[in-house]
Amino acid sequence: MGGIQIENLLTLMAGNKPFDRDQARREVLDYLNVHMTTVATDIEKKGEAVIPTASGTFILTKDDLIAAA
């Protein structure tokens, strides 16, 4: 996932709850690095993956990834 895609994810997250953008970026990247296989499997099977952050739960959908491309 590239920088623009992460930026789009963070923009979506910003609409849900106030958060520290840099902290959220680190949390999302850390989660994706550790759980990439699980995230990919969840998106493939369920159409979405849940990413927990200190700012709240973020749901990443297949449509989010398409929009970020």
Image: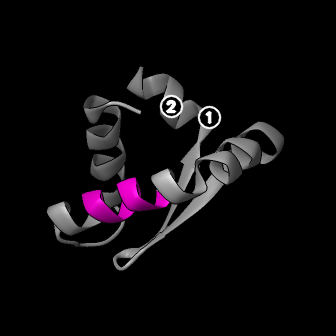
Q: Position of residue 17 (x, y in %)?
A: 31, 72
- Please report the residue visible at 42 percent of the width from the left and 33 percent of the height from the top: 1
- Amino acid found under the numbered disc labelled 1: Lys
Residue 18: quarter of image: bottom left
Q: CA distance from mark 2 to mark 1?
A: 5 Å
- Is 4 above or below relative to 34? above
Q: Residue at x 45, y 25 (%)?
A: 67
- Numbered circle sitting on residue 13: none
Mark 1 = which residue? 62
Query: Image height check: is 51 above or below 9?
Result: below
Q: Position of residue 3 (x, y in %)?
A: 26, 34
Q: Which residues are magenta?
A: 25-31
Q: Secondary structure at mark 2?
A: helix
Q: Please identify the dominant SS of the magenta region.
A: helix
Give the residue displayed 57% in from the left and 32% down from the top.
63
Q: Is residue 47 visible?
A: no
